[in-house]
Image (tube, rainbow, N blue to C red):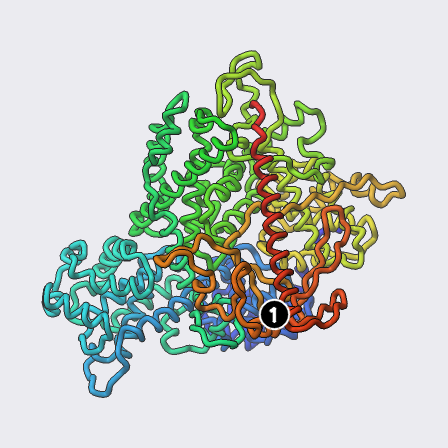
Amino acid sequence: MPPKSPRRGASSRPQDGQPSGAGNAIGDQDFAALCEKLNVSSPVRLRAWQSYEKMLSSDWTLRDTLGKIEALGLWLFIASVNSDDATFTFTELLRALNISVSKCFGLLNQIDINMDNLSTKVDNAVSKLKKKYQTTCHLYQKFHRTFDNIFMEQSNNWTTAESNTSYILKSCWLTFILAKGKVLQMDDDLVISFQLLLCVLEYFIKRSPSDVLKEPYKSAVNGISVSGSTRASRRVQSSNTWTSQLSATDTRVIEALCKANECPVDEVKNVYISSFVDFLSSAGISCIDGLPKVDVISQQYEELYKKNKDIDERLFLDSDGTLKVDYQESLEQERTPRKNHLEEAPMIPPQTPVRAALSTINQLMNILHSSSDEPSENLNSYFQKCTINPRTMITEGVECLGLVFRERFAIAVGPAFAQIGYQRYKLGVRLHYRVMESMLKSEEDRLSVQNFSRLLNNETFHRCLLACAVEVVVATYGRNLFQGLANSETTICFPWILGVFEQKAFDFFKVIESFIKAEPSLTKDMIKHLERCEHMIMECLAWQTNSPLYDLIRQSREREGADHPETSSTLQQPPQHNPTAADLYLSPSRNLHKCPAPSAPITNGQGPPTSQPQQRSTSLSVFYKKVYRLAYLRLQSLCNSLLSDHPELEQIIWTLFQHTLQHEYELMKDRHLDQIMMCSMYGICKAKNIDLRFKTIVTAYKQLTNTNQETFKHVLIREGQHDSIIVFYNLVFMQKLKSNILQYASPRPPTLSPIPQIPKSPYRFPNSPLKIPGGNNIYVSPLRSPYKSSDGLLSPSKLTPRTRILVSIGESFGVSEKFQKINQMVSSTERPIKRHADGAAPKPLKKLRFDGHDEADGSKTLSSESKFQQKLEEMKSARSRIQRQKSEESSDLKSEDSIKKEDE
């Protein structure tokens, strides 16, 4: 169906005979009063009033949801963003409408759902406001708790400002939000913001009387007063003295703060010296006598807030209604599994986003504790065994890219943070060398060779491997309030790193799986992040113009005719071998036609020169198999949501979808996989006379994971022109595939493509507790071994003091009461039926019961001793079966790994 044209007549119609001219004549009295209050310009007034009239005439549901003043204010906000003509701040808008920021975001979301006409510019503006609001919420809550741990409660005996903890709190928070606004260019960098907060707290601790401080800060300040300069002399220090590298005695307070908050001391010191000192000087408070004056700091922040036109963060101090939020929901506390109170055990504190981010950073530090930012002896040994020693090329490349990263990080985050960026880069270098060594050891075990000259002299491989390592570090520090594609010049989210290292997304794709498998210490969050990066590459990044993917596809078609390297017939074939990074980087590339003739000797990746014919690209084959699997899973989720009454359509839609990816791959250029999916669904439903509108598809699509509104609002039509998904379907997709779509309406439709085999994810999380499906808060964790201490081998039960009930198979079970307690927890838990590979349903698994009854097979009640023995035997048998399965899987993996890679 053709796209709907804007209703110009309805949207520009004046109300009640009022002229739609400029100035105060636009709209009714309520609208005019609101515009005067917000000092709105005439063009924005006109645009907002037209949008409001359009809403009234076209969407009754939205009109009932929104109050009149709320609707008028939100359309003024939308019009001002679209026109780049904001005359009011976001907080001023909230106060004029008398609504909270949370409600405002919810109403904007309702407008988007019902009207579906918010521009990308508005989406980005709202997203930025949400990030700043949520980040500041987390920081303020953390600030308040930390402040209470430092300063004594208010006493009536304290009369001076320096002794008034309420005054100190207010001045401290104002100084922090001013520093954050002036120093940071990224409002959502939680870690650097918190490190800056610690610098501000350190500054205030040193300038507060010791009798208002709690330990250990009181002792730290007194120690500085005794062994360092006096308090009075420190107040008049010049800004040059402030940069005196924080002497050993001067670091006591910052070290105490970092220890209490599990924050790396060196990083906080770096923030202090590189950015906070300069801020103190620029704000004119580096040499003041005593604490900064609240009115002076507030005035400076006022200027910054008016310039940015966003949220007034001072209002957090007053618990202002515009910032009202459900903190339980906002903090997104990550709690451990809830346990029944059968025994007394210490409670594990909830993980707030700040705590979770710092915890993840500490995990990364522990992984890299023993690693170096130089090649190890083992790596140097591999380098020396190469035909051409790559060490100089690698180390010089690492040094050169470090300077580039430092510069680009400073541009994105702020000039003062260049050194911090370089510190993070050096962590990435350590991870890069660590993973490289693990990869080479794995390849040596797999292929029984040690000469990796061709791989190790491949510059693209090294840049992508280093980029992957640095991305892990950057994402760890950015963890991870907000997900999604990069949408501004000041974000360091993926794929920012690809631009820094000048690498193509398709080349980066080749290293991800091998990187994860080579570093078993990666946390679950790190693995999930890399998996999401891989999905983004398959969805859109690898399909960008100038991607090497298109050259590989064209070369494959030239070699093998019209057939694609991954035809539909291979979709159900299980992989016989999981290619490694070496396989993917050394497979035929887009420059294959420039290689020596087949008769010329070619040095393969791991051995002496050989001659070989041209062969299909392993990287292309792996890429398409993964794309097919991802595409089908996305389609399946959308079909489950929209077409549950027509299950037969799923495979038909998949056939058109797969056909487009295989034969009409040019449609993917500079577009998104989900755009082709939605068009395929709409086209088949039209051919089959199923009433399914594009708006319905888009609404359901928004509910899928990792979706972005740009996917359906900003689709490439032709070079330089973008429009909605509907326009793309009518002008591009339908024109290209019309004859193919109409075949499905004929009595003899084309053969359907098989459903892709969906194997288990290669990214396993072996150390993560798994929840029993349908269970009453039951989790199973793998046995961690060895358990050693000074007393020898420890029982697992001695290592889990927080566990309420623990049964370790292979040990004495103890009293039978333990099983009764477990039985109470399990209650009516049922295990799902698992199907074998051949599709046959096995016998339903028994319920986990210890009372002699088995509802699954109707066993009779046994005596207490008999049932205990029976359960003991069942558990031992289960353990043996699991061990056999693991042994068989291990044998299969070894068998696969023993297959040598074919000559290139």
The quarter of the rendered structure image containing the C terminus is top right
Q: Position of residue 122 (x, y in %)?
A: 53, 59
Tell which of 690 and 126 is nearer to you. 690
Q: Residue at x 53, y 52 (%)?
A: 765
Q: Residue at x 44, y 38 (%)?
A: 438
| Residue positioned most to the right | 747
In the image, taking residue 879 as reference, residue 453 lies left or right, namely left
Asked whether residue 730 appears in the rendered view, the answer is yes
Tell which of 98 and 590 is nearer to you. 590
Q: Position of residue 691 (x, y in %)?
A: 79, 57
Q: Position of residue 543 (x, y in %)?
A: 58, 39
In the image, taking residue 862 as reference, residue 176 lies left or right, namely left
Q: Is residue 521 above or below residue 98?
A: above
Q: Is residue 782 above or below residue 601?
A: below
Pointer 1 local density, CA inside 10 Å: few below 14, some 14–19, many at least 20: some
| Residue positioned most to the bottom | 156
Determine the image quadrant of residue 25. Answer: bottom right
| Residue positioned most to the top | 599
Q: Amino acid at mark 1?
A: Asn
Determine the image quadrant of residue 302. Answer: bottom left
Q: Mark 1 = which residue?
A: 776
Asked whether residue 721 appears in the rendered view, the answer is no
Q: Secondary structure at mark 1?
A: loop
Determine the image quadrant of residue 873. Answer: bottom right
Exactly how many numbered labels are in the figure? Answer: 1
Q: Position of residue 211 (x, y in %)?
A: 19, 78
Tell which of 64 and 356 is nearer to you. 356
Tell which of 421 and 723 is nearer to you. 421
